[in-house]
Each structure stands twice: as C-alpha cells, then as structure tokens.
Amino acid sequence: MANETFVPPKAPKDLCFNEINFVQTVFDTDKFLQEHKANVSLEKLRDDLGIYLKILRSAMIELINRDYTDFVSLSSNLIGLDQAINNLATPLGQLKEEVKQVKQCLDDTITDMTNNLDKYQNIRDKRQSIHSLIRFHKSITKLADILSSCDKNINMSKPDVLERAAMQFNQLKFHFSRCQGDLSSDYISKMSDLDEQLKHSLSLLLVSYVKHKDILLLERCLRIYVSLDKVKDAEEVVRKKIVVPAIENIISDHTFQNDPAGLKGIYVKLENVLDSALKELLDLTLNSQSCSVKGYNFLINSYWPEIEQRIEDYIPMVFAPGNPELFHKRYRETLNFLLKLEQRCHTEDVIVQFKSHFQYTRFLSKWNLPVYFQIRFQEIAGTAESVFSAAISTSSIRRKKDSINNEEFMLHATNIVWDCLLRIWTDDVFLPQLLARFWKLCLQLCSRYQEWCKFALKHTWPAVQVNETNQNQEQSLQRLDFLVGLYTDVEKLAKKIPDILTIASAKVVNLSSVIMDSLNDTINESSLCLKSLLPQITEVLVGELLRHSGTHLRQISDIPRLFRRTNREVPTKPCAYVRRTLEFLERFSADYRSAVPETSSHWLSLAASGLTQQYISSVTDVLTSVQKTEESLRRLKKIRDKSAGISTTESQGTSDDEKIRIQLLIDVQSYIEIIKELGLTEAEVENLNQLLQIVETAAKSKAEAK
C-alpha cells in the first residue's frame, strides 16, 4: 500500500487550476500563485481552492471508511506472533552451528590441498630446473664448440654456422631463464663470454657483408640479429663500424673550412654516404617496395645520431647566429638536408619516429632562431627608424610630381618602409619557423609608418612669409609637394599592404584556415588604419592652400579707399587681388591635375569652398562698412543742408559707394570665372552662389533706391 502512487481526486473543469499541480515533486506556493494570479483574481483563486479543499476532505473520509475494517482487525492479527517467532529461533540456531562446522571442515580440506599442490609445484619446478640445467650444460658446450670452430677457421664463419650458434644461444637463454637460481656464477660468466663472442662474430660478418654489398647474405645476417633480439646491437655495429669511418673525414673543421660549398657541400657528401655505404641496409629495412627485414631503422638509430653528434662536436660554429646571412643560409641548407632524410623514411610512422628522436629535437634547438630574429629586427626596423628620425624637408621627396600616377612612391620614408616590408619575406631573410614574429614586425612597421605620417602632418616647416616672390612661392609648393606625395603614398601603401598576405602564404605551406583568417584580419586592419589618415592629410593640404591664397583677400578692405573722394571712373575691370588670390590654386591645379585628376579636383573644391567662405566674410564686412559710412554721410548732409536752408536733392551720377559695390560685383564675377577655369563647377564650390547673391543684391538695392 505504501508503494501505491497517490492519485488526487479530479478537480472540476471550471476551477482555475489542475489537481496535477499539487502532486509535483517540488510544490512551490509562490510559483503557484504567480502563475495563476495573472489569469484570475485572487478572490477567484481563493474560492476555487476552498472548493477543492472540500473535495479533498470528502475523498479522505471515503478512504478511511474503505480501509477501516483492515485497521481495526490489524491488532487481532498480531496476537501470537511473538510465540511463533520464538518457536523458530531454536531450530534456526542449531542449523547455523551445523553450517559453521561444515564450513570449517571445507576450509581445512582446501588448506591441505593447497599445501600439497604447492609442494607438488615446487617438485615440478625443481625437476624442470634440473632438466634445464642438463640442457643448459649441453647447449653451452655445443655453443662453445661452434664458436671456437669459427675462431679457428675463418672460412666457417658463414651465416649457416652462426645461424646454428644463434639457435643454440636462444635455447641457452630459454634454459637459463628456467634454472637461473641454480646456476653458479662460473656458468653465468661463461654464458656472458659466449654472448660477447657471438656478437663479435656477427659484427664481423655484418660489416663484411655491408662492405661487399652482398644483399642475400646481409639479409640472413640481419635475420640472425632479429632472432637473437639484438637489433639494437646491429644498429650500434653499423654506427661504429660503417658510419663513423665513412663520415669522420667529412664532418671536421678542416673539411668545413676548405670545402667551397661550405655546409651544403658536407650535407651532399653525407647524402652520398647513404647511397654508397648504407644503400643495401636501407633497401632491406626501410624501402617500402623491397623491405624484407623489419624491426631495423639504421637511418634513425645508426646514421643520424652519429651525424648530429659530430656536427655538435667538430663544427659547432655552424650554429652561430652572429652573421645573419650566413646563419640563414646554413639553417636553410640544414632544413633541406633533414627534409631529404625524411623523404628516405618512406612511411609516416618512420617520419614521426625520426622527428621525435631526442637528437633531432636537440639539434634543431641548437639553432638560436630568437637571436637571429632579433638581429634581423634591429637591421630592418633600424633602417626604417633612420628615415623616420630624419628631419622632414624637401629632401624627403624622392620623386617628381609627374611620377605620382606610377606605382613608385614619392617619399623616401614610404619607399624604405615598403622595401623593409618586402625584405622581411625575401628568401635570404624569412624563415617559416619565425612566421609569427616576422608577421608582427610587418604590423609594427605599418603602425610606425602611421605614427610618422601623423607627426609629419604636425611638423612645422621653416616659416615662409607669403608674398609675391618666386622663391617663397617655390618653398610653399615644396611643402605641398610633400603633402601630395604623402597622400598618394599612403593611398598606394594601403592598397599594397594586403599583398603581403599573398607573399607570406606562398612562403609557408599548409597554413590552417584559422591562421589565414587571423593574418587576413590583422593586415586588413593595418590597411584601414592607413586609409584613415587620408582625410587628415587632405585637411592639412587644403589648409596650406588656403594659407597661401587667403592672404590676398585682405585687399578687399582697401577697395573703399580707391573710390572715396577720388573721382575715379565707374569700374569695369576686376582688381588685381582676384587673380592673385586664385593664382596659387591655378599653379597647384596645373601641377597636379594631370597626375591625380580626381583627388586634385576634390582638394581644389575644398580649398575654393574655404576661400569663398573667407571672401563672403570680407565682402560682408566691406558692404556693412560702406553702408554705415553712407548713412553717416547722408545724415551729415541733411543737417548741413537744413542749417543752410537748402532743399535736399538726389545727387547726379554714380556715387562712390555705388562704384564700390560695382567693383565688388565685378571682382566676384571674375572670381567665379577663374574658379570655372580651374575645372570646378558652381555646385562643387560651397557658398559660391551665396557670394554672388550678396554682391548682386547690394548693387541692385542701391540702383533701385535711386
């Protein structure tokens, strides 16, 4: 009954909740109220809960009534249960004691049987040891006879004899493992001597077959080593007896100093050793097509360790990074040599074994790549820094303005930075193992160039007094030449920088997509940072144009003095300042319109807009002053005429103020015509129509007033 699942009475459908809500594993009152008060009011929820409470009480009463008989009869059913339990206790206790006795009897029997079996096993071991001792004695005697016959008669030292000796030695080892505890030290020593004697005979045979290039007999000899589980001994024999004599004259300080090809020449000779002294061994053990003897790796365990050790001992100067060109050359030659050794491994497993060899990793660690990079960093960054630290002047420009539309850079700084960026990836500088560091150097050069550009924009050139002398105008144009060169160089460099990724990816094979995406993001960011300088350069360049052009607009304030009380004729020609104001822009347009048509038009548009704004300010000031003067004179004249009793009449002819306004109108019209000659439209120059409207309005208003 306890295991039965309680099913609550079903709630009426018109209630706002379900009876299942109350039998959940965890019932949360707050959560229950939160869920239902959003749908119904609290009063409705209270009433529904009261209804369901009555249903639960009714269900409880029914449950009690249904099981009441069982509850009442429960106590009567338990009468006499204690007596029944006591009656069972005595026989169960007797049964327990009997089981214990049987268990003890079985345990004693098992112990006796185990002891007897152990004694029997000891007897068997002793008997086996005695038999092994007898066979050991026979085998060691037979092996000694075979080896002694080999020593007496050299001609008998053939694979078949040594195969017999190997078979006897294997039997000897087997019996030795079974009777080792019963052997005397003399027998153990004799066995060790025979082992050395057998290895000596095998080594002589192995060296002989390698030198005579007898593949069939060499294969049998190698199989003897495999049967004896002495593969490492065979590899050591090849290292000491074959490899060492073949390379001891190759890897030496004398050879290194006198070989015209240097380290590369040594590596070529070492490769020839593989094709001459070790060819048969490698064909039998490594060649995937002709491999017939497995378990050997003479390339990794015999050839390579001796090569690496001798390079470290006899020509350690190859690792010196002091001369970066020589270090780079030797390191690349070494990598090519290691790559050729990998190609001889034939399988991926052997290549992994070769690269994980402790002498392989130790050998590569001898090449101090961080020091090499530091030297290259100082060399490349120092070259760039020298031009960045140089004074900015006309000497900073390396190309004339007529070469702007070419791919070449105008400024020395940009050209050197680009050369430095390209130099990083040249074959005699870059190393794939230093990709991350060289890439970071590229980004640092771009960032440093960007900072130099900002400094160049803030740099103050020698002060030039703006006037009409050709010398001063030339100095101003040189400053503009620099700014134009800076703009075009930054624009070209920003376009060229993404090409660095193409160059870098061609230098390093098997770059993952994640790395490529990361490199692409960083180089594009550098390009965008450079492009962000273009508006700043434009602002400074336009400011330079305005500085040299706007000064002539000051002559507008002199126009009233030209006509007041001078009886000058009505003006028909523009003043000279108009042409002078735009003369600098005309010169600039003539110099750069053909080289950078779109950009120069943009610069001229901005400069003309700024100049027009200054023109409006000057004209407005003059017109305001003229109007005030005119009104003052009119009031004075009225007062004078009134005191003299003379009636006021309008003056005849064109007044001085009208001439001033006419002159301003002619000047503005001429100004607009010259701007159009620059190739600019009225829409491209801000406030140009406003300027014309101001002077036209002033001239018309005076004419209408008359």
Image (tube, rainbow, N blue to C red):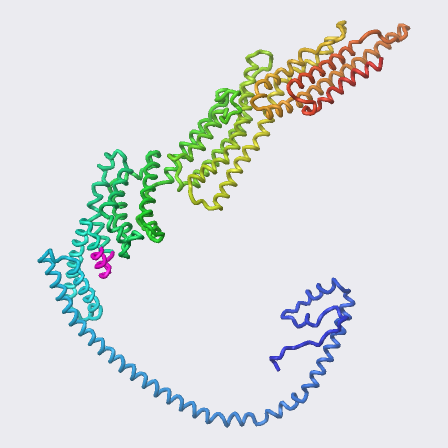
Q: Is residue 222 highlighted in magenta?
A: yes
- Image quadrant for the N terminus? bottom right
Rendered position, 90 above or below 566: below
The residue drawn where x is 22% and y is 70% is 178
The residue drawn where x is 28% and y is 47% is 304
Which of the pair 73/153 is nearer the observer? 153
Which of the pair 283/250 is nearer the observer? 283
Q: Is residue 110 left or right of residue 218?
A: right
Measuring from the top left, give residue 491's x and y in whole percent: 54, 30
Q: Is residue 358 highlighted in magenta?
A: no
Measuring from the top left, give residue 285's x and y in whole percent: 27, 53
The residue drawn where x is 25% and y is 43% is 272
Q: Is residue 284 left or right of residue 706?
A: left
Rendered position, 159 above or below 455: below
Q: Which residues are magenta?
A: 219-231
Rendered position, 257 above or below 664: below
Please tell me in which quadrant of the rendered image residue 130 appears: bottom left
